[in-house]
Image (cartoon, rainbow, N blue to C red):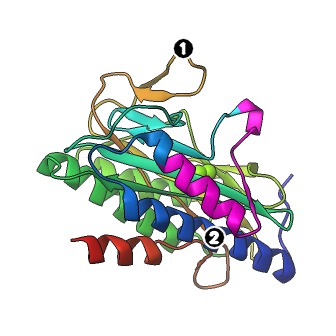
Amino acid sequence: MIHLKSEEEIELIRQSSLLVGKTLAEVARVIGPGITTKALDKVAEEFILDHGAKPGFKGYHGFPATLCVSVNEVVVHGIPSHRELKDGDIVSVDCGVVMNGYYGDSAFTFAVGEVDAKVVALVETTRQSLEQALEKAVAGNRIGDIGYAVQSFVEARGYSVVRDLVGHGLGRNLHEAPEVPNYGRRGTGARLQPGLVIAIEPMINLGTKSVVQERDGWTIRTADRLPSAHFEHDVVVRQGQAEVLSTFEFIDEVLKSRN
Ligand code: MG
Ligand code: MG
């Protein structure tokens, strides 16, 4: 069942989503060659706890960490570890928090050092595909319009869309109805209504769309081990224009100051 949110609920989701954006900016400050993915997780967890919230992923179906840190061919759900990042890696960092009973959930793909131009283009196209999707998250459209926007944009540029994992509704639960696929047909699926809060999160691959799960029960990687990128925003469907509740503003500021 789809639960449309009141303005009071939207405000609480906004606060949680904002904290996720600030947490990812803390990750942006320290990410680089030589740091372990576990060290990134520690930075995020401490920042979230210091701000009166709780990590949204830790303990969710038994997930062991605050962040999902997914390097190169890992699409999503990478478990932080003692692996050191190295020059040329791309890293999807996905973060959730829960505060005052409501979740925020957002992800950003970082480039570590000098990344191959082909892979940089994948990352940039994935971020742009999220922008394309946001434009369709308006009242009167359908879920399929969002997926179509992502799919048509990235496939025209030679990339593929992961089918096995999708975006989702968001609120008192991390994952609520409806599912929000990154592929689809225009004019199909549930009608978008004002007050619907969804996480839109394109997962785009350089090669095949096929993915496999590693034996740890979490890590999802591309079947051909080519890189994958991932960006995620929380948005509320409005009349005329979607309102984005999460933000990359703090991340972009940090990355700009580090260049
Ligand atoms: Mg997420
Ligand atoms: Mg999500």
Q: Label 1 is placed on what type of residue? A: Arg
Categorize mark 2 by other alpha carbons within 10 Å: few (<14), some (14-19), many (20+).
Answer: many
Q: Is residue 154 left or right of residue 56?
A: left
Residue 19 tag number: 2
Q: Residue at x 36, y 45 (%)?
A: 35
Looking at the rendering, the stretch of residues picked out in magenta corresponds to: 40-62
Residue 234's image quarter? Answer: bottom right
Figure check: 232 above or below 88: below
- State the CA–CA distance, disc 1 to disc 2: 32 Å
Q: Contact (CB < 8 A) between labels 1 and 2?
A: no
- Residue 256, position in %: x, y? 28, 76
- Give the SS element for disc 2: helix
- Residue 244, position in %: x, y? 58, 76
Assign the C terminus to one quadrant of the image. Answer: bottom left
Q: Can residue 129 be spotted in the picture?
A: no
Categorize mark 1 by other alpha carbons within 10 Å: few (<14), some (14-19), many (20+).
Answer: few
Q: Main secondary structure of the magenta part?
A: helix
Residue 215 tag number: 1
- Residue 253, position in %: x, y? 37, 78
Q: Is residue 87 left or right of residue 256?
A: left
Q: Nearer the viewer, mark 1 or mark 2?
A: 2
- Give the SS element for disc 1: loop
* Of the pair 172 and 71, the residue shown nearer to us: 71
* Of the pair 46 and 203, the residue shown nearer to us: 46
Tell me which label, 1 or 2, sits earlier in the chain.
Answer: 2
